[in-house]
Image (cartoon, grey):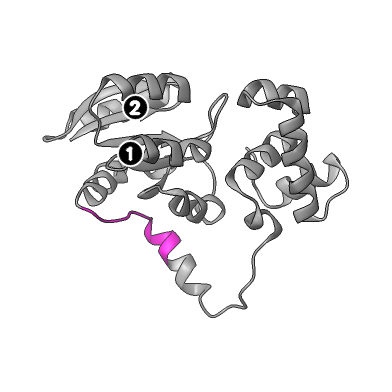
């Protein structure tokens, strides 16, 4: 199986490569540090699976899942993230990812996650599975940030990190008016009136690193 690793940290990529190169039947087809490099690679190389970090400069992993699937719906995606599984995994899976793995567990679970995904399954950790089961009997209802689209959620997180509308527009390659529109919809959905409320909420819910 041909695999691409996408992470903006070279040390992380090197660590993952060491794990994968020990395994038979796995070929490293390339690596990328951002979305632009990834899509250039996908245009030139046959790929079976993308190991994709959520948090990268420019477009986030969450933001490009659907675009990867639109390019080639046979490509499987394993999200690799430092963020809490219970906050991000379901959003990633609904967007089209086939699995979600925390960076803490990557060294010991990466290969098994990849093999399960390539055999047609979905991969989540035992801890996340327990969390989902334990919440089955709770009252239905979403937290405010769970009502956001992936683009709204990404802009929410960038604002929480202190980025201005202009900086977000430049980073996501959008117009200032478009970002302002997304921000307005996000603020309305979450019933916020200021950026300070966004920052406080993001910190309280562990949504930014």
The stretch drawn in magenta includes residue 106: no
Is residue 134 among the parts visible in the rendering?
yes
Tell me the quarter of the image containing the N terminus: top left
For residue 96, which numbered disc appears in the image? none
Q: Residues within 10 Å of mark 2 (few under 14, many from 20)?
A: few
Disc 1, SS: helix
Residue lying at the far left in this picture: please name it: 24
Secondary structure character of the magenta stretch overall: loop
Q: CA distance from mark 1 to mark 2?
A: 8 Å
Find numbered disc 2 in the image and state the secondary structure of the residue it sits on: helix
Please state if 135 lies on the left or on the right of 46 as rendered. right
Say whether residue 122 is magenta: yes
Residue that label 1 marks: 107
Whether tag 1 and tag 2 are in contact, CB under 8 A, the answer is yes
Residue 183 sits above or below residue 128 on the image: above
Expressed as whole percent of the image width and height from the top left, the position of residue 72 reads 31, 37
Spot the residue most to the bottom.
137
Neighbours of disc 1 within 10 Å: few (<14), some (14-19), many (20+)? some
Quadrant housing the C terminus: top right
Q: Earlier in the sequence, mark 1 or mark 2?
A: 2
When the figure is inspected, residue 83 is found, relative to residue 91, above or below; the finding is above
Q: Is residue 100 left or right of residue 182?
A: left
The answer to which quarter of the image holds residue 22 is top left
Q: Residue 183 in the image: x percent, y percent? A: 76, 40
In the rendered image, residue 205, in percent from the top left (x then y), is placed at 68, 52
Task: Give the labeled residue for mark 2.
Answer: 15
Closer-to-camera residue (55/74) = 74
Q: Residue at x 32, y 42 (%)?
A: 73
Q: Quadrant of residue 141?
A: bottom right
Segment tinted magenta in the rendering: 120-129
């Amino acid at each position: 199986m041909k695999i691409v690793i996408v992470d903006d940290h070279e040390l992380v990529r090197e660590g993952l490569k060491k794990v994968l190169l020990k395994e038979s039947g796995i070929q490293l087809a390339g690596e990328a540090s951002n979305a632009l490099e990834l899509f250039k690679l996908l245009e030139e190389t046959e790929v079976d699976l993308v190991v994709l970090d959520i948090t990268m400069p420019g477009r986030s992993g969450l933001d490009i899942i659907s675009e990867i699937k639109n390019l080639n719906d046979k490509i499987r995606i394993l999200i690799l993230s430092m963020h809490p599984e219970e906050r991000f995994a379901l959003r990633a899976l609904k967007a089209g990812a086939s699995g979600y793995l925390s960076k803490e567990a990557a060294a010991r679970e990466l290969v098994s996650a990849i093999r399960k995904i390539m055999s047609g399954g979905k991969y989540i950790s035992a801890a996340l599975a327990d969390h989902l089961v334990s919440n089955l009997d709770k009252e239905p209802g979403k937290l405010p940030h769970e009502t956001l689209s992936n683009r709204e959620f990404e802009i929410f997180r960038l604002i929480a990190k202190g980025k201005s509308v202009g900086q977000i527009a430049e980073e996501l390659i959008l117009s200032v008016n478009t970002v302002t529109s997304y921000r307005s919809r996000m603020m309305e959905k979450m019933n916020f009136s200021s950026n300070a409320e966004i920052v406080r909420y993001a910190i309280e819910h562990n949504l930014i690193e």
